[in-house]
Image: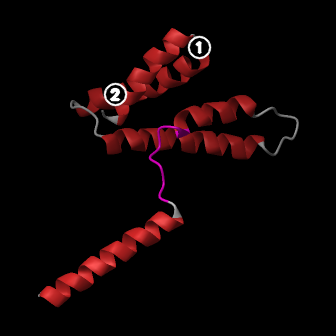
Amino acid sequence: MSLFAKVKSDITIARSAGDKNKVLKLSTLIGEAQSFEMTKKSPLTDSEFLAILKRFISNIDETLEVLRKNPEKDLSEIIAEREIYVQYLPKEMSQEEIEKFFEVYSNGFKNTIALG
């Protein structure tokens, strides 16, 4: 299932659960993605949808940065919005996973050289 299809599926679930805030935020994201699709005249790839998603998160981060200068401002709603979007980002590899990947890769490379 594509990332865009996952978001579309999740908005249906949010509607059924009565989560109006999540429906509103995902509707905005879907609308932006569909607008891009119409301009492009072909379906979005996951990387294109991910770029839109990252732009949404970046805009929220910039807003948070500005608003944090005002200690009286309640940021919980904006932070909650950010969390809705962040859940769709790919999981980053841990340092341990990266090290294991390179260990396996470098061992495979050494074995290839020995066979060559």
In this picture, residue 54 sits left or right of residue 112: right
Majority SS type along the magenta span: loop
Q: Residues within 10 Å of mark 1 (few under 14, many from 20)?
A: few
Q: Which residue does the image show at 64% across and 45% down from the upper left?
A: 62
Colour style of the rendered protein structure: secondary structure
In what element is the residue under mark 1? helix
Q: Position of residue 35 (x, y in %)?
A: 35, 26
Q: Mark 2–mark 1 contact, CB under 8 Å?
A: no
Above or below, 24 against 88 in this view is above
Write down the residue under mark 1: 20
Mark 2 vs 1, N-terminal side? 2
- Mark 1: amino acid: Lys
- Residue at left offset 60%, top offset 36%: 83
Is residue 31 visible from the viewing direction of this image? no
Residue 5's disc number? 2
**88 inside magenta stretch:** yes
Type of the residue with mark 2: Ala
- Residue occupying image coordinates x 66% and y 31%: 80
Query: Front-most of 14 and 36?
Result: 14
Residue 32 screen position, x and y as percent: 42, 28
Task: From the viewer's side, name the closer residue of 26 and 37.
Answer: 26
Report the magenta residues as a range.
86-93
Query: Looking at the image, which residue is at 50% across and 67% down?
Result: 96
Q: CA distance from mark 2 to mark 1?
A: 19 Å
